Image (spheres, rainbow, N blue to C red):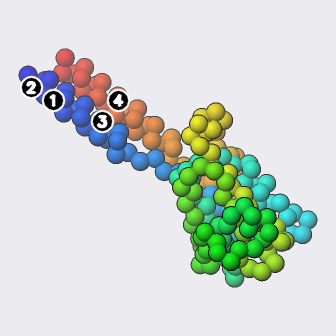
């Protein structure tokens, strides 16, 4: 009887631990070491090229580092026109972190007049969980992605399952 009660408690512990474990995303630094700046005249697609090399998922964050500039999240039409009077998001702190909270496209432009027209704009496509699994779950090879903990989430589950099987085998 005591063994079955202990087994039940351990099962509940593992279940709760799995439910409470969080998996966080990647923190991408937009523009790498250069940051969020007006690109050179011959490289106006630098940000979209960078974004297309990465596999963004809900829970990831974008870090925009800049001086005397700003970043705005806008609609597709505002992105195409390089203009927004009512952005969904605006920041001019110099170190902006933007959380990608759902799948689909996100449109970013600089809030400084003329910068968007010179190429300081970007479309980020966040994959749904189905798209992510279909692509093999691989992340982009960008060196500006730092410390992922997706793998840590799986190792926690593996460890807890191992622990449960060890305790169960010891009891019976």
Q: Quadrant of residue 79?
A: bottom right
Q: Which residue is mark 1?
A: 6
Which of the marked residues, 4 or 2, is nearer the chain's N terminus? 2
Q: Are marks 3 and 1 in contact (CB under 8 Å)?
A: no
Q: How far apart in space, not on screen, are marks 4 and 2 (Cα)?
A: 21 Å
Which of the marked residues, 3 or 2, is nearer the chain's N terminus? 2
Q: Are marks 1 and 4 in contact (CB under 8 Å)?
A: no
The secondary structure type at the circle numbered 3 is helix
Q: Residue 15 has which mark?
A: 3
The secondary structure type at the circle numbered 4 is helix
Q: Which residue is mark 2?
A: 2
Q: How far apart in space, not on screen, are marks 3 and 2 (Cα)?
A: 20 Å
Which of the marked residues, 4 or 3, is nearer the chain's N terminus? 3
Residue farthest toward the right in the current orientation of the protein: 42
Near-viewer residue (40 or 118):
118
Q: Are marks 2 and 1 in contact (CB under 8 Å)?
A: yes
Q: How far apart in space, not on screen, are marks 1 and 4 (Cα)?
A: 16 Å
């Amino acid at each position: 009887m005591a063994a079955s009660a202990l087994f039940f408690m351990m099962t509940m512990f593992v279940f709760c631990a799995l439910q409470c474990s969080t998996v966080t995303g990647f923190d991408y630094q937009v523009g790498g070491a250069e940051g969020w700046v007006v690109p050179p005249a011959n490289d106006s697609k630098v940000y979209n090229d960078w974004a297309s090399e990465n596999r963004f998922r809900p829970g990831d964050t974008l870090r925009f580092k800049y001086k005397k500039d700003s970043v705005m999240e806008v609609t597709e039409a505002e992105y195409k026109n390089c203009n927004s009077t009512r952005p969904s998001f605006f920041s001019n702190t110099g170190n902006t972190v933007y959380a990608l909270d759902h799948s689909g496209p996100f449109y970013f432009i600089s809030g400084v007049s003329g910068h968007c027209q010179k190429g300081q704009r970007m479309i980020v496509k966040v994959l749904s969980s189905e798209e992510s699994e279909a692509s093999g779950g691989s992340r982009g090879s960008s060196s500006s992605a730092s410390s992922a903990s997706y793998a840590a989430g799986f190792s926690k589950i593996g460890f807890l399952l191992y622990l449960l099987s060890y305790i169960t085998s010891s009891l019976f």
